[in-house]
Image (tube, helix red, strand yellow):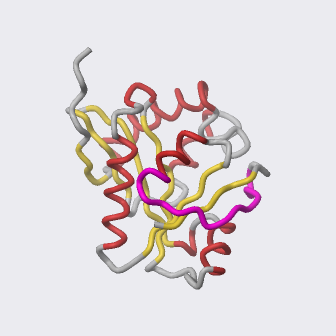
Amino acid sequence: MPRKPAPRITRYVPARHEEALLTILYRMHTQENYPPVAVTPTPEAIPAWLNHYGYEERYIALINATVVGHIQLVPSEEGEHGLTILTAELGLPANTHVKEVARLFTSLDYRHMGVGETLLNHAVAKVENTGGRATLCVNDSQTSAINLYLRTGWVPIGTYTGAYTGEPVLGFLH
């Protein structure tokens, strides 16, 4: 099978990209419980989850003209509360210089092709180019995601109990 081309990262435009992202998420929700049912109990709740943090600093990955992934940067004071506590314990108070990577996902058909890594590298570069630090969190059961984060230079900073799922969540800093 021929290798698919490398993804191109571009800004998210709701009118052009939202339908494709929702299609990806509906399939992921059914097959992988992402976003978790505790957060989005029905498929109808997925658009609100996707747009919870608004439309700023959202990027998509395209291969040819196909939307294959998404990532968002969120000011830490608007992000995951447990992650904000962990970063504050490290001396990084919630402010505009600390951004949380959120809503990172890749189409099931484009996994293990560098899409997630390309999105992460793009997000980290955006944050670090402004002198900031990037954080993220993941359920500790998501071993594939954790391996990706470790491979791309993220450092675990602690765990906490997820507010919505009640499951252990691992925080990372880049």
Q: Where's residue 74, x and y in %?
A: 48, 66
**Residue drawn 22% across the image and 18% down it:** 2
- Measured from the top left, where is residue 114 in percent x and y? 34, 39
Q: Does the magenta stretch include residue 66?
A: no
Q: Residue furthest top?
A: 1
Whether residue 161 appears in magenta in the rendering, the answer is yes
Total number of numbered discs in the rendering: 0
Compared with 61, 133 (above or below) is: below
Q: Quadrant of the N terminus?
A: top left
Seen in the picture, residue 67 relative to 52 is either above or below; the reply is above
Residue at the outermost right position: 166
Where is residue 172, by image quadrant?
bottom right
Task: Name above or below for residue 164 compared with residue 98.
Answer: above
Residue found at x 39% / y 63%: 56
Residue drawn 70% across and 61% down?
159
Q: In which quarter of the image is residue 163?
A: bottom right
Range drawn in magenta: 150-164
Of the pair 41 and 144, the residue shown nearer to us: 144
Q: Nearer the viewer, residue 57 or 135?
A: 135
Q: Residue at x 50, y 50 (%)?
A: 103
Please state the horizontal and vertical placement of residue 148, each as a whole percent of the image. 47, 46
Residue 107 is left or right of residue 34, and the answer is left
- Left or right for 156, reference 68: right
The vertical placement of 173 against 9, above or below, is below
